Image (spheres, rainbow, N blue to C red):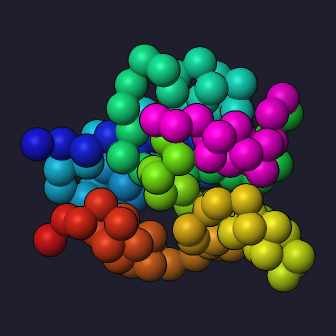
Amino acid sequence: MRVKVLIVEDSKASREYIAAMVEAVEGVEVVVTSSGFEALKLLPRHRFELIITDINMPDINGLELINFVKKNPNYRDVPLFIITTEGREQDRERGLALGAVEYLVKPFLPGSLEALLRRYLKLP
């Protein structure tokens, strides 16, 4: 059985990089979108087991997206990672307080993302 991961990232290079790392994990299917608004439109049409979002995006930013997702009963318990260039402690605290379970600052080691994916998706 494959698990679905949603990646929300407005930077094409970052989106492709993160998607390639996630797709490299066996048993994971990736859905990508470039905006928070598009992500909100995808949520009712799919069942995602994990969501990865950036913070800085043009329409709905990552923090607003987390807020919406965590208020949705279907996604309240879905793990959410933030991957961002925002390295300030206050940004990290705010993201985790809103409901993200992990906060990675770009650039990060690919192995760290893979380990987190395996842990939260309960993959070998």
Q: Observer-nearest residue: 12 or 124?
A: 124
- What is the x, y in percent for residue 35? 69, 31
Question: Which residue is at a point 25% across and 44% down the rendered structure image?
Answer: 3
Residue 52's spot in the image, x, y percent? 54, 51
How many marks on residues?
0
Q: Is residue 100 left or right of residue 31?
A: right
Q: What range is drawn magenta here?
A: 59-74
Foreground of the two, 103 or 26: 103
Picture quadrant where residue 95 is located: bottom right
Say above or below: 69 vs 111: above
Q: Nearer the viewer, residue 5 or 110?
A: 5
Front in this rendered view, residue 55 or 15:
55
Q: Is residue 121 above or below residue 105?
A: above
Residue at far front of view:
73
**Residue at point 54% right, 56% down?**
80
Side (left or right) of 62 relative to 78: right
Q: Quadrant of residue 98?
A: bottom right
For the C terminus, the quadrant is: bottom left
Say which residue appears at 56% left-offset and 68% top-offset: 101
Relative side of 85 to 53, left or right: right
Image spot of residue 112 (x, y percent): 44, 78
The quadrant of the rendering that contains the N terminus is top left
Name the chief secondary structure element in magenta: helix
100 versus 46 height, above or below: below
Residue at screen point 58% across, 35% down: 72
Farthest residue, direction left = 1
Q: Is there any visible trace of residue 56 in the rendered image? A: yes
The reply to whether residue 114 is in sight is no
